[in-house]
Amino acid sequence: MDTDVPLVVPEVNPEAAFGHSGIIANPNCSTILLAVAAWPLHKHVAPISRIVCSTYQAASGAGAAAMAELEQQARDWVSGSDITQDIFQRQYVWNLFSHNSPIDSTTGYNEEELKMIRETRKIFNEPALHTTATCIRVPVLRAHCEAINISFAHPVPDLEVVARQALSSAPGLRIVDDRGTNTFPEPLAASDQDDVLVGRIRSDLSAPLDTGLELFIAGDQIRKGAATNAVQIAELFLER
Amino acid sequence: MDTDVPLVVPEVNPEAAFGHSGIIANPNCSTILLAVAAWPLHKHVAPISRIVCSTYQAASGAGAAAMAELEQQARDWVSGSDITQDIFQRQYVWNLFSHNSPIDSTTGYNEEELKMIRETRKIFNEPALHTTATCIRVPVLRAHCEAINISFAHPVPDLEVVARQALSSAPGLRIVDDRGTNTFPEPLAASDQDDVLVGRIRSDLSAPLDTGLELFIAGDQIRKGAATNAVQIAELFLER
Protein backbone atom coordinates (compact mmCIF):
# COMPACT_ATOMS: atom_id res chain seq x y z
CA MET A 1 0.00 0.00 0.00
CA ASP A 2 2.89 2.35 -0.74
CA THR A 3 1.18 3.99 -3.69
CA ASP A 4 -1.08 6.35 -1.75
CA VAL A 5 -1.04 9.84 -3.15
CA PRO A 6 -0.18 11.58 0.14
CA LEU A 7 2.98 9.49 0.47
CA VAL A 8 4.42 10.26 -2.94
CA VAL A 9 7.18 12.85 -2.88
CA PRO A 10 8.63 14.61 -5.90
CA GLU A 11 11.99 13.40 -7.15
CA VAL A 12 14.62 15.72 -5.80
CA ASN A 13 18.29 16.23 -6.40
CA PRO A 14 20.07 16.91 -3.09
CA GLU A 15 22.79 18.87 -4.87
CA ALA A 16 20.12 21.20 -6.23
CA ALA A 17 19.72 22.62 -2.72
CA PHE A 18 22.95 24.53 -3.17
CA GLY A 19 21.68 26.22 -6.31
CA HIS A 20 18.55 27.84 -5.01
CA SER A 21 17.87 30.81 -2.79
CA GLY A 22 14.65 29.71 -1.12
CA ILE A 23 13.88 28.20 2.26
CA ILE A 24 15.60 24.95 3.33
CA ALA A 25 13.31 23.03 5.66
CA ASN A 26 14.67 21.33 8.77
CA PRO A 27 13.17 17.84 8.93
CA ASN A 28 10.93 16.44 11.63
CA CYS A 29 12.94 15.52 14.75
CA SER A 30 12.20 11.77 14.71
CA THR A 31 13.03 11.66 11.01
CA ILE A 32 16.41 13.36 11.50
CA LEU A 33 17.49 10.80 14.07
CA LEU A 34 16.38 7.89 11.88
CA ALA A 35 18.06 9.35 8.79
CA VAL A 36 21.38 9.99 10.57
CA ALA A 37 21.58 6.30 11.51
CA ALA A 38 20.10 4.75 8.36
CA TRP A 39 21.78 6.86 5.67
CA PRO A 40 25.36 5.52 6.13
CA LEU A 41 23.94 1.99 5.89
CA HIS A 42 21.98 2.83 2.74
CA LYS A 43 25.00 4.51 1.18
CA HIS A 44 27.87 2.28 2.26
CA VAL A 45 26.43 -1.15 3.14
CA ALA A 46 23.55 -1.92 0.75
CA PRO A 47 20.38 -0.24 -0.47
CA ILE A 48 17.73 -0.27 2.26
CA SER A 49 14.51 -1.85 1.05
CA ARG A 50 12.38 -1.42 4.19
CA ILE A 51 12.44 0.25 7.61
CA VAL A 52 10.19 -0.65 10.56
CA CYS A 53 10.57 1.94 13.31
CA SER A 54 9.08 2.31 16.79
CA THR A 55 9.74 5.56 18.63
CA TYR A 56 10.09 6.41 22.30
CA GLN A 57 9.58 10.19 22.20
CA ALA A 58 10.23 12.74 24.91
CA ALA A 59 7.97 15.50 26.18
CA SER A 60 10.30 18.12 24.66
CA GLY A 61 8.91 17.43 21.20
CA ALA A 62 5.67 19.03 22.36
CA GLY A 63 7.42 22.12 23.70
CA ALA A 64 8.66 23.60 26.96
CA ALA A 65 5.18 23.74 28.48
CA ALA A 66 4.78 19.99 27.90
CA MET A 67 8.08 19.30 29.66
CA ALA A 68 6.94 21.51 32.53
CA GLU A 69 3.63 19.65 32.78
CA LEU A 70 5.38 16.28 32.93
CA GLU A 71 7.67 17.56 35.71
CA GLN A 72 4.66 19.03 37.52
CA GLN A 73 2.90 15.66 37.29
CA ALA A 74 5.83 14.03 39.09
CA ARG A 75 5.55 16.62 41.85
CA ASP A 76 1.78 16.10 42.00
CA TRP A 77 2.23 12.33 42.23
CA VAL A 78 4.81 12.60 45.02
CA SER A 79 2.67 15.01 47.02
CA GLY A 80 -0.50 13.02 46.43
CA SER A 81 -2.24 15.93 44.64
CA ASP A 82 -4.52 15.71 41.60
CA ILE A 83 -2.38 15.22 38.49
CA THR A 84 -2.17 18.38 36.32
CA GLN A 85 -3.49 17.49 32.83
CA ASP A 86 -3.78 20.80 30.96
CA ILE A 87 -1.71 19.91 27.87
CA PHE A 88 -1.94 16.18 27.23
CA GLN A 89 -5.36 15.68 28.87
CA ARG A 90 -4.08 12.57 30.59
CA GLN A 91 -1.62 11.31 33.17
CA TYR A 92 1.78 11.18 31.47
CA VAL A 93 4.00 10.33 34.43
CA TRP A 94 4.14 6.48 34.81
CA ASN A 95 2.31 6.25 31.47
CA LEU A 96 2.91 6.42 27.72
CA PHE A 97 0.61 7.07 24.80
CA SER A 98 0.33 7.18 21.02
CA HIS A 99 1.81 10.40 19.60
CA ASN A 100 -0.58 13.34 19.95
CA SER A 101 -0.51 14.48 16.29
CA PRO A 102 -3.67 14.26 14.14
CA ILE A 103 -4.48 10.88 12.63
CA ASP A 104 -5.00 10.45 8.90
CA SER A 105 -8.40 8.80 8.48
CA THR A 106 -7.38 6.91 5.33
CA THR A 107 -4.24 5.22 6.60
CA GLY A 108 -4.73 5.33 10.38
CA TYR A 109 -1.18 6.68 10.70
CA ASN A 110 -0.64 9.85 12.70
CA GLU A 111 1.07 12.90 11.24
CA GLU A 112 4.36 12.18 13.01
CA GLU A 113 4.49 8.71 11.45
CA LEU A 114 3.61 10.01 7.99
CA LYS A 115 6.38 12.62 8.30
CA MET A 116 8.86 9.85 9.03
CA ILE A 117 7.71 8.01 5.90
CA ARG A 118 7.57 11.03 3.58
CA GLU A 119 10.62 12.93 4.80
CA THR A 120 12.88 9.87 4.83
CA ARG A 121 11.98 9.33 1.17
CA LYS A 122 12.80 12.94 0.43
CA ILE A 123 16.09 13.01 2.36
CA PHE A 124 17.25 9.71 0.84
CA ASN A 125 15.99 10.80 -2.58
CA GLU A 126 14.23 7.42 -2.77
CA PRO A 127 10.58 8.17 -3.62
CA ALA A 128 9.54 4.56 -3.09
CA LEU A 129 11.46 3.74 0.10
CA HIS A 130 9.29 1.47 2.24
CA THR A 131 9.06 2.76 5.79
CA THR A 132 6.55 2.22 8.56
CA ALA A 133 6.57 3.79 12.01
CA THR A 134 4.70 3.69 15.29
CA CYS A 135 5.24 6.90 17.27
CA ILE A 136 4.81 6.80 21.03
CA ARG A 137 5.36 9.41 23.72
CA VAL A 138 7.14 8.12 26.82
CA PRO A 139 7.66 9.95 30.14
CA VAL A 140 11.14 11.22 29.28
CA LEU A 141 12.05 14.91 29.24
CA ARG A 142 14.18 15.71 26.21
CA ALA A 143 15.73 12.96 24.06
CA HIS A 144 13.96 10.61 21.66
CA CYS A 145 14.80 6.92 21.18
CA GLU A 146 13.95 4.64 18.25
CA ALA A 147 14.01 0.89 17.72
CA ILE A 148 14.88 0.49 14.04
CA ASN A 149 14.54 -2.67 11.98
CA ILE A 150 16.19 -2.43 8.58
CA SER A 151 15.88 -4.77 5.58
CA PHE A 152 18.45 -4.59 2.80
CA ALA A 153 17.79 -5.20 -0.88
CA HIS A 154 20.40 -7.96 -1.05
CA PRO A 155 22.50 -10.03 1.38
CA VAL A 156 25.74 -8.50 2.68
CA PRO A 157 28.32 -11.04 3.91
CA ASP A 158 29.22 -10.33 7.55
CA LEU A 159 26.44 -7.75 7.66
CA GLU A 160 26.81 -6.92 11.35
CA VAL A 161 30.54 -6.25 11.04
CA VAL A 162 30.16 -4.22 7.86
CA ALA A 163 27.26 -2.20 9.33
CA ARG A 164 29.23 -1.45 12.49
CA GLN A 165 32.11 -0.14 10.39
CA ALA A 166 29.81 2.10 8.36
CA LEU A 167 28.15 3.48 11.49
CA SER A 168 31.46 4.06 13.30
CA SER A 169 32.81 6.27 10.53
CA ALA A 170 29.58 8.19 9.85
CA PRO A 171 29.22 11.85 10.83
CA GLY A 172 26.94 12.78 13.71
CA LEU A 173 26.82 9.28 15.18
CA ARG A 174 28.45 7.74 18.25
CA ILE A 175 28.34 4.00 18.86
CA VAL A 176 27.28 3.05 22.41
CA ASP A 177 27.08 -0.71 22.34
CA ASP A 178 28.64 -2.56 25.27
CA ARG A 179 26.94 -5.92 25.69
CA GLY A 180 29.05 -6.83 28.74
CA THR A 181 27.83 -3.93 30.87
CA ASN A 182 24.40 -3.57 29.20
CA THR A 183 25.37 -0.05 28.12
CA PHE A 184 23.35 1.12 25.12
CA PRO A 185 21.78 4.39 23.98
CA GLU A 186 19.61 6.00 26.67
CA PRO A 187 17.82 9.34 26.52
CA LEU A 188 19.63 10.74 29.57
CA ALA A 189 23.02 10.00 27.98
CA ALA A 190 21.90 11.60 24.70
CA SER A 191 20.51 14.74 26.33
CA ASP A 192 22.43 17.92 25.58
CA GLN A 193 24.61 16.06 23.04
CA ASP A 194 24.95 16.84 19.34
CA ASP A 195 25.63 13.23 18.31
CA VAL A 196 23.01 10.55 17.83
CA LEU A 197 23.87 7.48 19.94
CA VAL A 198 23.51 4.11 18.21
CA GLY A 199 23.67 0.63 19.73
CA ARG A 200 22.04 -2.81 20.02
CA ILE A 201 23.60 -3.35 16.58
CA ARG A 202 22.80 -6.94 15.63
CA SER A 203 21.72 -9.08 12.70
CA ASP A 204 17.95 -9.51 12.57
CA LEU A 205 17.10 -13.12 13.51
CA SER A 206 13.77 -12.91 11.67
CA ALA A 207 15.30 -11.97 8.29
CA PRO A 208 17.03 -14.15 5.71
CA LEU A 209 20.76 -14.47 6.45
CA ASP A 210 22.68 -11.17 6.18
CA THR A 211 19.72 -9.11 4.95
CA GLY A 212 18.35 -7.59 8.16
CA LEU A 213 19.71 -5.37 10.94
CA GLU A 214 18.39 -4.19 14.30
CA LEU A 215 19.45 -0.87 15.90
CA PHE A 216 18.45 1.21 18.90
CA ILE A 217 19.23 4.92 18.86
CA ALA A 218 18.88 7.96 21.13
CA GLY A 219 19.20 11.60 20.15
CA ASP A 220 18.52 14.95 21.75
CA GLN A 221 15.25 16.20 20.30
CA ILE A 222 16.12 19.84 20.94
CA ARG A 223 19.71 19.73 19.64
CA LYS A 224 20.16 17.26 16.76
CA GLY A 225 16.38 16.97 16.41
CA ALA A 226 15.99 20.71 15.82
CA ALA A 227 18.47 23.54 16.54
CA THR A 228 21.79 21.73 15.96
CA ASN A 229 20.59 20.32 12.66
CA ALA A 230 19.52 23.77 11.44
CA VAL A 231 22.94 25.16 12.38
CA GLN A 232 24.65 22.24 10.61
CA ILE A 233 22.64 22.90 7.44
CA ALA A 234 23.71 26.57 7.57
CA GLU A 235 27.35 25.54 8.14
CA LEU A 236 27.19 23.27 5.09
CA PHE A 237 26.24 26.29 2.98
CA LEU A 238 28.95 28.47 4.49
CA GLU A 239 31.57 25.83 3.69
CA ARG A 240 30.70 25.78 0.00
CA MET B 1 19.79 -16.23 10.42
CA ASP B 2 16.86 -18.19 11.76
CA THR B 3 18.74 -21.48 11.79
CA ASP B 4 20.66 -20.97 15.04
CA VAL B 5 20.53 -24.00 17.27
CA PRO B 6 19.39 -22.12 20.40
CA LEU B 7 16.31 -20.86 18.59
CA VAL B 8 15.06 -24.24 17.43
CA VAL B 9 12.23 -25.62 19.54
CA PRO B 10 10.92 -29.17 19.47
CA GLU B 11 7.70 -29.76 17.60
CA VAL B 12 4.88 -29.83 20.10
CA ASN B 13 1.23 -30.75 20.01
CA PRO B 14 -0.79 -28.30 22.12
CA GLU B 15 -3.48 -30.90 22.73
CA ALA B 16 -0.82 -33.16 24.23
CA ALA B 17 -0.70 -30.84 27.23
CA PHE B 18 -3.98 -32.30 28.46
CA GLY B 19 -2.58 -35.82 28.44
CA HIS B 20 0.41 -35.38 30.71
CA SER B 21 0.82 -34.91 34.41
CA GLY B 22 3.97 -32.80 34.49
CA ILE B 23 4.58 -29.11 34.93
CA ILE B 24 2.92 -26.62 32.55
CA ALA B 25 5.13 -23.54 32.20
CA ASN B 26 3.62 -20.06 32.20
CA PRO B 27 5.26 -18.12 29.36
CA ASN B 28 7.35 -15.00 29.64
CA CYS B 29 5.17 -11.93 30.26
CA SER B 30 6.06 -10.05 27.04
CA THR B 31 5.49 -13.23 25.05
CA ILE B 32 2.03 -13.79 26.54
CA LEU B 33 0.86 -10.33 25.53
CA LEU B 34 2.25 -10.73 22.00
CA ALA B 35 0.72 -14.19 21.62
CA VAL B 36 -2.73 -13.11 22.82
CA ALA B 37 -2.85 -10.46 20.07
CA ALA B 38 -1.10 -12.36 17.28
CA TRP B 39 -2.67 -15.81 17.65
CA PRO B 40 -6.21 -14.87 16.48
CA LEU B 41 -4.65 -13.27 13.40
CA HIS B 42 -2.51 -16.34 12.70
CA LYS B 43 -5.48 -18.65 13.18
CA HIS B 44 -8.33 -16.71 11.58
CA VAL B 45 -6.82 -14.17 9.15
CA ALA B 46 -3.75 -15.75 7.49
CA PRO B 47 -0.56 -17.52 8.56
CA ILE B 48 1.88 -15.04 10.07
CA SER B 49 5.24 -15.17 8.33
CA ARG B 50 7.13 -12.58 10.41
CA ILE B 51 6.76 -10.46 13.54
CA VAL B 52 8.83 -7.36 14.37
CA CYS B 53 8.17 -6.29 17.97
CA SER B 54 9.40 -3.39 20.11
CA THR B 55 8.49 -3.47 23.78
CA TYR B 56 7.85 -0.72 26.32
CA GLN B 57 8.22 -2.67 29.57
CA ALA B 58 7.27 -1.63 33.09
CA ALA B 59 9.33 -1.83 36.27
CA SER B 60 7.01 -4.53 37.61
CA GLY B 61 8.67 -7.13 35.40
CA ALA B 62 11.75 -6.80 37.58
CA GLY B 63 9.77 -7.25 40.80
CA ALA B 64 8.26 -5.21 43.62
CA ALA B 65 11.63 -3.83 44.73
CA ALA B 66 12.22 -2.44 41.23
CA MET B 67 8.84 -0.71 41.28
CA ALA B 68 9.68 0.72 44.69
CA GLU B 69 13.04 2.00 43.44
CA LEU B 70 11.42 3.74 40.48
CA GLU B 71 8.91 5.40 42.82
CA GLN B 72 11.72 6.37 45.18
CA GLN B 73 13.62 7.92 42.26
CA ALA B 74 10.63 10.17 41.55
CA ARG B 75 10.62 11.29 45.19
CA ASP B 76 14.40 11.82 45.06
CA TRP B 77 14.08 13.89 41.88
CA VAL B 78 11.31 16.06 43.32
CA SER B 79 13.21 16.67 46.55
CA GLY B 80 16.51 17.29 44.75
CA SER B 81 18.23 14.34 46.49
CA ASP B 82 20.72 11.92 44.95
CA ILE B 83 18.82 9.38 42.84
CA THR B 84 18.63 5.91 44.49
CA GLN B 85 20.22 3.39 42.08
CA ASP B 86 20.52 0.13 44.04
CA ILE B 87 18.70 -2.19 41.60
CA PHE B 88 19.12 -0.86 38.06
CA GLN B 89 22.45 0.95 38.68
CA ARG B 90 21.17 3.94 36.74
CA GLN B 91 18.59 6.70 36.78
CA TYR B 92 15.32 5.16 35.59
CA VAL B 93 12.93 8.07 36.15
CA TRP B 94 12.93 10.29 33.00
CA ASN B 95 14.98 7.59 31.28
CA LEU B 96 14.64 4.24 29.51
CA PHE B 97 17.11 1.48 28.78
CA SER B 98 17.63 -1.82 27.03
CA HIS B 99 16.13 -4.73 29.01
CA ASN B 100 18.36 -5.80 31.89
CA SER B 101 18.51 -9.53 31.06
CA PRO B 102 21.82 -11.17 30.02
CA ILE B 103 22.86 -10.74 26.39
CA ASP B 104 23.66 -13.74 24.22
CA SER B 105 27.14 -13.14 22.82
CA THR B 106 26.43 -14.96 19.55
CA THR B 107 23.28 -13.14 18.49
CA GLY B 108 23.49 -9.89 20.49
CA TYR B 109 19.87 -10.45 21.57
CA ASN B 110 19.07 -10.32 25.28
CA GLU B 111 17.35 -13.18 27.08
CA GLU B 112 13.96 -11.41 27.09
CA GLU B 113 14.09 -11.03 23.31
CA LEU B 114 15.15 -14.66 22.78
CA LYS B 115 12.27 -15.80 24.99
CA MET B 116 9.86 -13.87 22.78
CA ILE B 117 11.28 -15.62 19.71
CA ARG B 118 11.47 -19.14 21.19
CA GLU B 119 8.27 -19.15 23.23
CA THR B 120 6.13 -17.70 20.45
CA ARG B 121 7.30 -20.55 18.22
CA LYS B 122 6.40 -23.03 20.93
CA ILE B 123 2.99 -21.52 21.73
CA PHE B 124 2.07 -21.24 18.04
CA ASN B 125 3.51 -24.70 17.35
CA GLU B 126 5.42 -23.11 14.46
CA PRO B 127 9.08 -24.08 14.95
CA ALA B 128 10.23 -21.76 12.17
CA LEU B 129 8.12 -18.67 12.90
CA HIS B 130 10.23 -15.59 12.14
CA THR B 131 10.15 -13.15 15.04
CA THR B 132 12.48 -10.38 16.13
CA ALA B 133 12.17 -8.19 19.20
CA THR B 134 13.81 -5.21 20.86
CA CYS B 135 13.00 -5.13 24.57
CA ILE B 136 13.17 -1.81 26.38
CA ARG B 137 12.34 -0.80 29.95
CA VAL B 138 10.40 2.44 30.25
CA PRO B 139 9.58 4.38 33.44
CA VAL B 140 6.13 2.87 33.87
CA LEU B 141 5.09 0.96 36.98
CA ARG B 142 3.14 -2.14 36.03
CA ALA B 143 1.85 -2.69 32.48
CA HIS B 144 3.87 -3.53 29.37
CA CYS B 145 3.21 -2.15 25.89
CA GLU B 146 4.35 -3.50 22.53
CA ALA B 147 4.48 -2.08 18.99
CA ILE B 148 3.87 -5.11 16.78
CA ASN B 149 4.49 -5.30 13.03
CA ILE B 150 3.06 -8.44 11.45
CA SER B 151 3.67 -9.85 7.96
CA PHE B 152 1.30 -12.45 6.55
CA ALA B 153 2.24 -15.30 4.24
CA HIS B 154 -0.25 -14.17 1.59
CA PRO B 155 -2.43 -11.12 0.87
CA VAL B 156 -5.81 -10.88 2.60
CA PRO B 157 -8.35 -8.64 0.85
CA ASP B 158 -9.53 -5.90 3.21
CA LEU B 159 -6.87 -6.97 5.68
CA GLU B 160 -7.52 -4.21 8.21
CA VAL B 161 -11.26 -4.96 8.37
CA VAL B 162 -10.73 -8.71 8.58
CA ALA B 163 -8.04 -8.34 11.25
CA ARG B 164 -10.24 -6.05 13.32
CA GLN B 165 -13.02 -8.64 13.22
CA ALA B 166 -10.67 -11.42 14.31
CA LEU B 167 -9.29 -9.33 17.17
CA SER B 168 -12.73 -8.19 18.35
CA SER B 169 -13.97 -11.74 18.80
CA ALA B 170 -10.79 -13.16 20.34
CA PRO B 171 -10.66 -14.12 24.02
CA GLY B 172 -8.62 -12.01 26.41
CA LEU B 173 -8.46 -8.98 24.11
CA ARG B 174 -10.22 -5.62 24.21
CA ILE B 175 -10.02 -3.23 21.27
CA VAL B 176 -9.16 0.37 22.30
CA ASP B 177 -8.81 2.18 19.01
CA ASP B 178 -10.50 5.59 18.77
CA ARG B 179 -8.69 7.70 16.18
CA GLY B 180 -10.95 10.71 16.76
CA THR B 181 -10.00 11.16 20.41
CA ASN B 182 -6.49 9.66 20.13
CA THR B 183 -7.52 6.93 22.57
CA PHE B 184 -5.36 3.84 22.24
CA PRO B 185 -3.84 1.29 24.61
CA GLU B 186 -1.92 2.89 27.48
CA PRO B 187 -0.26 1.16 30.43
CA LEU B 188 -2.34 3.04 33.02
CA ALA B 189 -5.57 1.88 31.37
CA ALA B 190 -4.29 -1.71 31.19
CA SER B 191 -3.15 -1.81 34.81
CA ASP B 192 -5.13 -4.11 37.06
CA GLN B 193 -7.07 -5.46 34.05
CA ASP B 194 -7.18 -9.09 32.86
CA ASP B 195 -7.63 -8.20 29.18
CA VAL B 196 -4.89 -7.16 26.81
CA LEU B 197 -5.76 -3.85 25.13
CA VAL B 198 -5.16 -3.64 21.37
CA GLY B 199 -5.28 -0.60 19.11
CA ARG B 200 -3.54 1.42 16.39
CA ILE B 201 -4.84 -1.33 14.11
CA ARG B 202 -3.82 -0.35 10.58
CA SER B 203 -2.46 -1.77 7.35
CA ASP B 204 1.32 -1.52 7.18
CA LEU B 205 2.25 1.13 4.58
CA SER B 206 5.68 -0.44 4.07
CA ALA B 207 4.36 -3.88 3.11
CA PRO B 208 2.90 -5.11 -0.18
CA LEU B 209 -0.85 -4.45 -0.33
CA ASP B 210 -2.89 -6.41 2.25
CA THR B 211 0.06 -8.39 3.64
CA GLY B 212 1.15 -6.30 6.63
CA LEU B 213 -0.48 -5.06 9.83
CA GLU B 214 0.55 -2.69 12.61
CA LEU B 215 -0.75 -2.99 16.20
CA PHE B 216 -0.05 -1.40 19.57
CA ILE B 217 -0.97 -3.32 22.70
CA ALA B 218 -0.91 -2.87 26.47
CA GLY B 219 -1.30 -5.54 29.11
CA ASP B 220 -0.85 -5.81 32.86
CA GLN B 221 2.46 -7.56 33.44
CA ILE B 222 1.41 -8.85 36.85
CA ARG B 223 -2.07 -10.05 35.84
CA LYS B 224 -2.22 -11.34 32.26
CA GLY B 225 1.58 -11.35 32.09
CA ALA B 226 1.85 -13.70 35.06
CA ALA B 227 -0.77 -14.59 37.69
CA THR B 228 -3.97 -14.32 35.62
CA ASN B 229 -2.49 -16.42 32.84
CA ALA B 230 -1.48 -19.16 35.29
CA VAL B 231 -5.01 -19.19 36.73
CA GLN B 232 -6.50 -19.32 33.21
CA ILE B 233 -4.29 -22.31 32.34
CA ALA B 234 -5.52 -24.05 35.50
CA GLU B 235 -9.15 -23.21 34.67
CA LEU B 236 -8.68 -24.70 31.20
CA PHE B 237 -7.71 -28.00 32.81
CA LEU B 238 -10.60 -27.89 35.27
CA GLU B 239 -13.06 -27.35 32.40
CA ARG B 240 -11.93 -30.48 30.56
Image (tube, coloured by chain):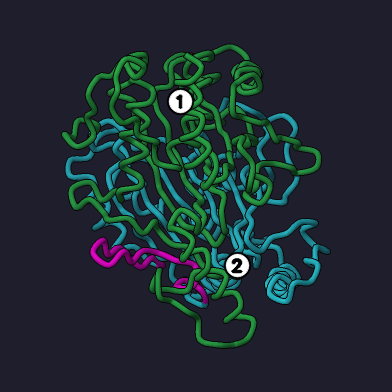
Chain colours: A cyan, B green
Q: Secondary structure at mark 1?
A: strand
Residue at x 52% of width, y 63% of height:
B67
- Rendered location of residue B183, percent (x, y): 74, 42
Q: Which residue is mark 2?
A: A226
Residue at x 57% of width, y 49% of height:
B143
Q: Secondary structure at mark 2?
A: helix
Residue A185 in the magenta stretch? The answer is yes
Residue at x 54% of width, y 55% of height:
A56
Gap in Å between the C-alphas at discs 2 and 1?
34 Å
Residue B224 seen from this side: yes
Position of B112 with respect to A164 (left or right) is: right
In this picture, which residue range is highlighted in magenta? A172-191
Q: Residues within 10 Å of mark 1 (few under 14, many from 20)?
A: many
Q: Main secondary structure of the magenta part?
A: loop
Task: Locate residue A109: give its quadrant.
Answer: top right
Residue at x 57% of width, y 45% of height:
B220
Subunit of mark 2?
A
Position of A138 with respect to B105 (left or right) is: right
Q: Point out which mark residue B151 bears.
A: 1
Which amino acid type is marked by label 1?
A: Ser
Subunit of mark 1?
B
Task: Please tell me whether residue B22 is drawn above or below residue A32 in the rendered image.
Answer: above
- Rendered location of residue A190, percent (x, y): 47, 71
